[in-house]
Image (cartoon, rainbow, N blue to C red):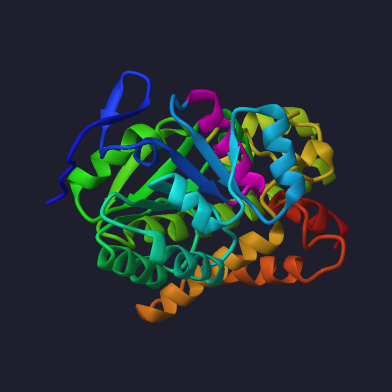
């Protein structure tokens, strides 16, 4: 059973888990990449208590502190956890998460709330949770959906694996500062299961939308009209109505800025590898998932495509 000793307020009008002292009224975020920066921005805008950040990239640190001078900078992950008992991590891969938490473990205690929003293997999420639990703290796998647009707008969906419903309820107000949907998925690791299934479907749908937009425009359809028809018909999906891969159709999508500043092909390829590994572990073979994984492995190792947003699969298809 999750027990909170005293209430603290990190969100205006909302009281949740807390102990005494400034550390226990502070939140820290490690990882200011494409997603992490948007999350940190929303914390800086909405949290009523101190916000700490840490990243290896000094340019990312300079950017957030220029935009939000009240955000505090930690010199290391350990220093951040010493200043904030609630720590959010948003990192590229399982190995990065394991390394950061090995560093953090000595500074964790019973007041520690560790929320990992990276997309990693469910087994790693469970292992990290066990280690945090051994220090008396609480760990949550809380990967997100919504892309860089959702991170920036504070409209992400959080898929949360938690030690208990009570512990989930204690962090929901904080996650709600960064997202519009915060969903309890079950025990530790289930958040990652939901995320891998979502991203497998996302990769498949982006390839499908790209092929449809390519075929339609090659056959003479106006891309704006075609997208409008798809978005009001049974082919409608997020990859078409929010993140359309055809340049110019949606002004805020990466396709309209030459596929920069989004969710890279490298990261999509990584997520699909994780999904395929998970599928193998439970003796199933997703046919379209395997196809999508193969496509994004090619893009992630193709010069001039590896770091582009994953919607650049449209550009890749168009050049074939």
Asked if residue 287 lies left or right of residue 173, the reply is: right
| Quadrant placement of the C terminus | bottom right
Quarter residue 122 falls in: bottom left
> Magenta span: helix, strand or loop, mainly?
helix
Quarter residue 9 falls in: top left
Asked if residue 1 lies left or right of residue 219, the reply is: left
- From which residue to which does the magenta span run? 31-46
Q: Residue at x 37, y 35 (%)?
A: 25
Q: Specify whether residue 196 is in view.
A: yes
Of residues 287 and 116, the one nearer the viewer is 116
Query: Is residue 62 positioned above or below 104 on the image?
Result: above
Q: Residue at x 51, y 69 (%)?
A: 94
- Residue 268 position in % (x across, y down): 62, 60
Of residues 270 and 178, the one nearer the viewer is 178
- Residue 73 position in % (x across, y down): 61, 43
Query: Is residue 66 positioned above or below 295 on the image?
Result: above
């Amino acid at each position: 059973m999750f027990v909170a000793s005293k209430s603290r307020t990190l969100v205006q009008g909302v009281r949740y888990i807390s102990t005494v002292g400034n550390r226990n009224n502070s939140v820290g975020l490690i990882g200011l990449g494409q997603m992490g920066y948007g999350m940190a921005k929303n914390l800086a805008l909405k949290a009523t208590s101190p916000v700490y950040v840490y990243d290896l990239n000094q340019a990312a640190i300079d950017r957030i502190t220029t935009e939000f001078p009240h955000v505090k900078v930690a010199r290391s992950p350990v220093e951040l956890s010493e200043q904030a008992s609630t720590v959010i991590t948003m990192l590229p891969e399982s190995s990065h998460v394991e390394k950061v938490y090995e560093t953090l473990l000595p500074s964790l205690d019973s007041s520690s709330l560790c929320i990992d929003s990276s997309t990693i293997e469910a087994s790693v999420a469970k292992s990290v949770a066990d280690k945090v639990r051994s220090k008396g703290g609480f760990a949550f796998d809380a990967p997100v959906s919504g892309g860089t647009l959702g991170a920036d707008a504070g409209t992400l969906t959080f898929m949360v694996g938690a030690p208990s419903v009570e512990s989930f309820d204690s962090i929901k107000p904080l996650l709600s500062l960064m997202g519009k949907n915060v969903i309890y998925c079950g025990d530790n690791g289930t958040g990652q299961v939901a995320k891998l299934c979502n991203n497998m479907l996302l990769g498949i749908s982006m390839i499908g939308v790209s092929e449809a937009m390519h075929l339609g425009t090659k056959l003479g359809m106006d891309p704006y009209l075609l997208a409008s028809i798809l978005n009001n018909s049974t082919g409608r999906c997020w990859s078409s109505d929010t993140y359309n891969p055809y340049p110019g159709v949606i002004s805020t999508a990466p396709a309209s800025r030459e596929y920069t500043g989004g969710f890279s092909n490298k990261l999509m390829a990584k997520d699909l590898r994780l999904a395929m590994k998970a599928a193998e572990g439970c003796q199933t073979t997703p046919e379209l998932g395997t196809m999508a994984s193969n496509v994004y492995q090619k893009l992630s190792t193709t010069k001039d495509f590896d770091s582009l947003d994953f919607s650049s699969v449209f550009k890749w298809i168009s050049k074939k």
